[in-house]
Image (cartoon, rainbow, N blue to C red):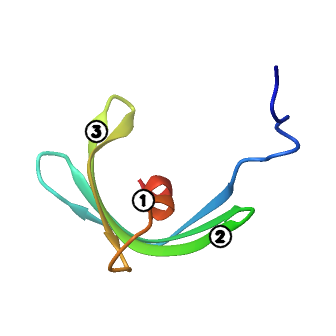
Amino acid sequence: HMRHAWADRPGPRTRRFVSAVRAFEAGSGAVRADSHLLVAIDGGRDRALITAGREDVLVPSGASWSLLRRRVLLDVEVPTHLELSIVF
């Protein structure tokens, strides 16, 4: 028994815009990358624009990089569950 087909109830559309990326040496081969984040969510009745700053620490992992730590600084005092589920 199928309640709804995906085409009848599409999931929320999310766009993430990352800008103003700055990178700094963080010691032991790690890199700290600071950036600004704008997330636009359109989920039918649920719509939101979320702005935040991100501070990431990346470490070398073979031929690429792995995220060691991420700090997200939201530009709102009391975020909603929708905002938290999308940003993180």
Circles 1 and 2: CB atoms closer than 8 Å:
no
In the picture of the structure, the residue carrying the numbered disc 2 is 47
Q: Given the image, on which type of amino acid does mark 1 rest?
A: Leu
Q: Horizontal placement of 25 versus 82: left or right?
A: left
In the picture of the structure, the residue carrying the numbered disc 1 is 84
Residue 65: percent from the left, percent from the top? 36, 40
| Total marks in image | 3
Q: Nearer the viewer, residue 52 or 10?
A: 10
- Give the quarter of the image for residue 25: bottom left
Q: Nearer the viewer, residue 47 or 58?
A: 47
Q: Give me the C-alpha separation between circle 1 and circle 3.
A: 28 Å
Image position of 83 with respect to 53: above or below? above
Q: Given the image, on which type of amino acid does mark 3 rest?
A: Pro
The answer to which of marks 1 and 3 sits earlier in the sequence is 3
- Farthest residue, direction left: 28
The image quadrant where one finds the N terminus is: top right
Q: Give me the C-alpha separation between circle 3 and circle 2.
A: 37 Å
Q: Residue at point 80% right, 46% down?
A: 9
* Residue neighbourhood size for the residue with mark 2, other residues' Cα within 10 Å, grouped as few (<14), some (14–19), many (≥20): some
In the picture of the structure, the residue carrying the numbered disc 3 is 60
Q: Horizontal placement of 78 versus 4: left or right?
A: left
Circles 3 and 2: CB atoms closer than 8 Å:
no
Q: Horizontal placement of 17 versus 2: left or right?
A: left
SS of the residue at dot 1? Answer: helix
Image position of 87 with respect to 21: above or below? above
Q: Residue at point 25% right, 54% down?
A: 31
